[in-house]
Amino acid sequence: MEHIVTVAVVNFHPVWGDKKRNLERICGYVRSCARRGADIIVLPETALSGYSDDPNPVREEKMHQRLAESIPGPASEAVSALAKQYGVYAVFGMPERDGKQVYNSAAVCMPDGAVKRYRKIHLPGDEINWAERGEDPLLFHTPWGPVGVGICYDVFEYPELARYYRAKGARLLLNPCAVPTKVGTQHQNNSIRAAVISSQLYIASANIFGPDADLLFQGASGILGPGDLQAGYAQYAGKPFGAEGANQGDAYFATIDLSYTQQTGISDMFEGGPRTGEPDWRPDLYRRWLKDICDDPAWQAKFRKKSE
């Protein structure tokens, strides 16, 4: 298994509702980043369509519903052709249609021409107005081992996903996101740094920047990972949320050593170590605790109330 990989994350400004124009620019970034030496290229959540909710009250007539397409489909196949041409992995966000259902998804285009998809599991704010919740994680295999995918809220607020990927052997998590200015910069910085430290893996985030219908987005795409090998973190590329110049169009590159995830001061959490010979992370216990929550009548009542 290889350890050294070059990752590019793109601060991208999608034109709201203009899928043709956005796809042309997505392809342009993939082509340019590949030529500059990137092995893996990440663009933001809903890069194909724009993010903001359409105010149209009819769900089926909202912008994301109208522009949604299958994965594989025309947009993902256009990007996958470039991924195959240049021998890279390219990930970008888009509304995905599967029959009557539409999801906030990420298309993962592979160097062999295959296309995989990840559906956002946790939907904040107005996303529920046009999208269904996904259910499944996505790990795809690379020369650098398995790589995981999450979308924004999945990564910033739910450590369960990052922990799952890390325990399955992933050392890199790709995070297409759409973080607007109305979300606090300190909170976002703290969340992503905590995820890197607590799960001991690299996270490559690509964010929208600039105006998008009724929202303004922060940019601040970046690549973070283990820092001093003492359970710290380092910003290997890009800029923190709120930093000067973070809200400008750019592609940020980092060549990272994924073996650092197995050399940190708390890598025994997932790798096992000299004290017990076993990983410190104990999913056998957590499974029992989570089952207790699922079986708890008080927890079940919260779902009954919503359906009544």
Image: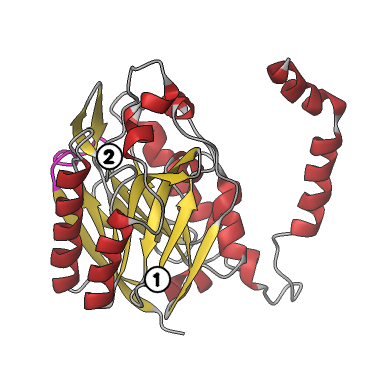
Q: Is residue 244 left or right of residue 242?
A: left
Q: Which residues are magenta?
A: 241-249
Res. 114 mark: 1
Tag 2 or tag 1, which sits nearer the N-term? 2
Is residue 194 in view? yes
Q: Which residue is mark 2?
A: 49
**Type of secondary structure dominating the magenta stretch:** loop
Q: Quadrant where the C terminus lies?
A: top right
User: How far from the left and from the top, in percent, is residue 301?
Assistant: 79, 22
Q: Is residue 39 magenta?
A: no
Between 2 and 80, the one lying in front of the other is 80
Please determine whether, in this image, residue 199 is positioned above or below residue 133: below
Q: Give amino acid for label 1.
A: Ala
Give the quadrant of residue 75: bottom left
* Circle 2 Cα neighbour tier, 10 Å, few/some/many (<14 / 14–19 / ≥20): many
Q: Give amino acid for label 2.
A: Ser
Q: Residue at x 50, y 44 (%)?
A: 99
Spatial CA span between label 1 and label 2: 22 Å
